[in-house]
Image (tube, grey):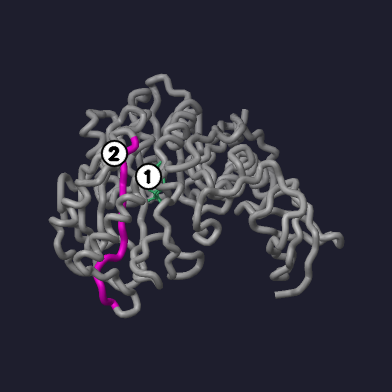
């Protein structure tokens, strides 16, 4: 670590929420935890090829947007990078991140709407909390950034607010029956993770313990859980998930129902979803609904359209828009997700949706070669963005509308640039949606149409 200390005025942010400023000599410095408009006394801790990395020693001029996060493990836990910004600054940061990506990566001066944002806390409907032997007894919490050491935390701001009560009960239960947490190094012990899923609309909760070997006294655990007051939530499912493997994969393949059902339900945009232990489901349903509503609005459906929903997961976008389209075809690579999508379509009596398992970049060229076309294509790819072959095929198919939904604006900007070379251009502003308040992530959605 260098002993160099400089005072830096922060003028903007990196894409992961670190403050950016310059030294008096003009070198760029990244400072985690610093806010735009602040002056921070900064220790230079690392010299990169094109920039310096600093650490705040003292805040000389503080921003009115700075808040002290009501979290005991920030910033140690590493889950939330921007909890020190108030809601307004988080929205600004996300909008600017989107504008920067389009300008730098896409070479496009895109119009960006204000970030849509929702409840800042307790928005996640899924939590997986590691359990281990800590210095002062059994610890449930979060891995310290880059380590396998647990920072105990019972009040995560992002998960359901009742989780602390369940953690207290788990520790009491394990102490009473002398049940050891799992130890990765020795492969001894039993309890690995506490895994909780909730239906925000249904208010159903699933509580699962991930174990290395059979959980002793399961009935006592069930009785203990059922005696808890979880506020507006009620326990619909208590599970044990057996993970006998070494290594850091959280969930194992074997599920044992200890109480109730082996799934919960939730409703999103009028469609009911069955959520099993392992099913993929969007973690912030409130923000996700807003994202889908925007995507559906941009799709401009009248009831006559053939729609392709590519990278469809369990079909949540397809099933949300099916009523407004002639037919929707979802394409998804994960077989289990396709089975969930089909089952959800059937349970909701949606008959004009079909789901195809496979890679979008293989399925779409095949359908196109067989003479199928879409009037509207929606893509919602993983972080790496869309495959080139897919973009080329969509361009050849010439849909009237292409709605791009993205969880990584850098690859979206890259793909929009490629699409502009293939005859498509942005036909709406880009809307950032804050599905993950407190973190540097942002989802975006925009419409593209053929160049006239
Ligand atoms: N639209 C869904 C899921 C988006 S996440 C939702 O809103 O919930 C991206 C999805 O793309 C994941 O389900 C992932 O399994 C799937 N996927 C990844 N690569 C793919 C590919 N090459 N072809 C089709 N699906 C793919």
Q: Position of residue 173 (x, y in %)?
A: 23, 60
Mark 2 touching mark 1, by CB under 8 A?
Answer: yes
| The N terminus: image quadrant | bottom right
Query: Is residue 83 inside the magenta stretch?
Result: no
Q: Under tag 2, what secondary structure?
A: loop
Query: Is residue 194 inside the magenta stretch?
Result: yes
Q: Residue at x 50, y 30 (%)?
A: 401
Q: Which quarter of the figure has residue 114? A: top right
Q: Which mark is residue 233?
A: 2
Q: Residue at x 17, y 66 (%)?
A: 214
Q: Is residue 42 above or below residue 2?
A: above
Q: Which residues are magenta?
A: 187-200
Q: Which quarter of the figure has residue 43? A: bottom right
Among the two numbered marks 2 and 1 on one chain, the one whose residue lies closer to the N terminus = 1
Q: Which mark is residue 160?
A: 1
Does the beta carbon at disc 1 come under 8 Å from ligand 1?
Answer: no
Q: Position of residue 140 (x, y in %)?
A: 37, 61
**Residue extending farthest top:** 302
Determine if residue 224 is in view: yes
| The C terminus: image quadrant | top right
Q: Residue at x 53, y 37 (%)?
A: 433
> Alpha-carbon neighbours of circle 2 within 10 Å: few (<14), some, or many (≥20)?
some
Q: Under tag 1, what secondary structure?
A: loop
Q: Position of residue 432 (x, y in %)?
A: 56, 38
Determine if residue 366 is in view: no
Is residue 199 shown left or right of residue 15?
left
**Residue extending farthest right:** 25
In the image shown, does 106 or 231 lie closer to the viewer?
231
Q: Which mark is residue 134?
A: none
In the image shown, does 252 or 174 lie closer to the viewer?
174
């Amino acid at each position: 670590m260098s002993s160099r200390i400089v005072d830096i005025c922060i003028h903007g942010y990196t894409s992961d929420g670190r403050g950016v400023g310059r030294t008096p000599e003009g070198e760029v410095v990244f400072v985690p935890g610093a806010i735009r408009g602040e002056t921070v006394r900064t220790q230079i801790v690392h010299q990169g090829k094109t920039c310096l990395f600093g650490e705040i020693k003292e805040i000389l001029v503080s921003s009115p947007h700075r808040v002290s996060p009501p979290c005991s493990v920030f910033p140690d836990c590493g889950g939330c990078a921007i909890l020190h910004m108030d809601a307004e600054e988080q929205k600004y940061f996300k909008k600017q991140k989107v504008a920067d990506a389009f300008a730098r990566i896409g070479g496009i001066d895109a119009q960006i709407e204000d970030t849509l944002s929702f409840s800042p806390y307790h928005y996640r409907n899924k939590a997986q909390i590691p359990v281990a032997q800590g210095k002062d007894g059994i610890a449930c919490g979060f891995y310290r950034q880059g380590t396998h050491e647990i920072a105990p935390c019972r009040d995560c701001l992002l998960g359901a607010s009742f989780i602390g009560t369940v953690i207290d009960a788990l520790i009491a239960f394990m102490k009473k029956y002398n049940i050891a947490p799992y130890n990765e190094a020795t492969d001894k012990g039993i309890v690995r993770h506490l895994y909780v899923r909730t239906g925000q609309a249904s208010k159903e909760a699933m509580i699962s313990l991930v174990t290395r070997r059979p959980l002793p006294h399961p009935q006592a655990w069930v009785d203990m859980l059922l005696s808890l007051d979880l506020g507006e939530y009620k326990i619909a499912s208590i599970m044990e998930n057996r993970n006998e493997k070494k290594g850091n994969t959280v969930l194992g393949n074997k599920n044992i129902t200890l109480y109730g059902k082996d799934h919960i339900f939730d409703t999103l945009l009028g469609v009911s979803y069955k959520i099993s232990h392992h099913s993929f489901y969007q973690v912030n349903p409130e923000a996700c609904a807003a994202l889908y509503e925007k995507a559906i609005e941009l799709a401009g459906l009248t009831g006559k359209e053939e729609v392709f929903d590519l990278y469809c997961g369990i079909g949540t976008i397809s099933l949300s828009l099916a009523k407004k389209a002639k037919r929707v075809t979802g394409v998804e690579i994960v077989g289990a997700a396709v089975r969930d999508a089909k089952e959800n379509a059937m349970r909701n009596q949606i008959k004009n949706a079909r789901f195809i398992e496979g890679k979008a970049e293989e399925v779409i060229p095949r359908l196109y070669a067989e003479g199928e076309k879409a009037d509207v294509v929606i893509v919602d790819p993983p972080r790496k963005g869309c495959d080139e072959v897919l973009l080329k095929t969509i361009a050849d198919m010439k849909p009237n509308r292409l709605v791009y939904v993205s969880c990584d604006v850098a690859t979206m900007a890259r793909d929009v640039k490629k699409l502009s070379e293939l005859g498509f251009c942005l036909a709406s502003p880009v809307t950032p949606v804050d599905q993950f308040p407190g973190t540097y992530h942002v989802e975006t959605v925009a419409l593209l149409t053929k160049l006239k």
